[in-house]
Image (tube, rainbow, N blue to C red):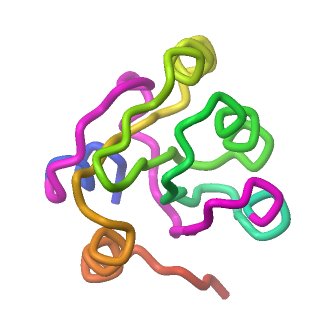
Amino acid sequence: MNLNEIAHKLGLEVRAGGSALTTEVRGGYASDLLSDVIAHGQEGDLWVTLQAHENTVPVAILKKLAGIVLVNGREPEAETLQKARAEDIPVLVSALPAFELIGRLYALGVPGIRT
């Protein structure tokens, strides 16, 4: 399933990287610690976090993540948007809390663990 389909089904709002919404989501990862995402995130993961600062974008690039979803209605900082747009990294926003959003992603078939 690609980001555009997920955004549509879950009512996610796109803030950056709209041209990359055809990216296939291979899995999901949830963490608010950048070092944890660097250590455990996998290529193609959709990252669920409440971290809205600009350092999330380099982590997404490094790990080749499908995109970043901010939860609890958090909005990305201006610097985050600037970096994400420059690198075409999808940043989406959800009003849902992380627990609820992750459950809905899982129900759509987005796995957490890939073998």
Judge whether 47 appears above or below 101 on screen: above
Of 78 and 8, nearer the camera is: 78
Q: Residue 109 is drawn in which quadrant? A: bottom left
Q: Residue at x 27, y 50 (%)?
A: 94
Residue at figure coordinates x 45%, y 52% from the top left: 24
Q: Is residue 35 magenta?
A: yes
Q: How many marks?
A: 0
Q: Nearer the viewer, residue 33 or 44?
A: 33
- Give percent across and percent down for residue 13: 24, 37
**Closer to the camera in the image, 81 or 4:** 81
Q: Quadrant of residue 105?
A: bottom left
In the drawing, does residue 113 fall left or right of residue 20? right
Span of residues in magenta: 9-36
- Magenta-span inclusion, residue 6: no
Screen quadrant of the C terminus: bottom right
Question: From the viewer's perspective, is residue 20 above or below residue 44?
Answer: above
Residue 49 placement (x, y as % from top left): 51, 56
- State the residue in front, 114 or 81: 81
- In this rendering, the answer to whether 81 lies above or below 22 is above
Name the residue: 62% across, 60% down. 32
Answer with the quarter of the image where residue 31 lies: bottom right
Across and down, in percent, residue 47 comes to 54, 57
> Quarter of the image containing the N terminus?
bottom left
**Residue 103 as seen in the image, left or right of residue 114:** left
Q: From the top left corner, tell me how far across and down residue 73 is, in percent.
A: 28, 46
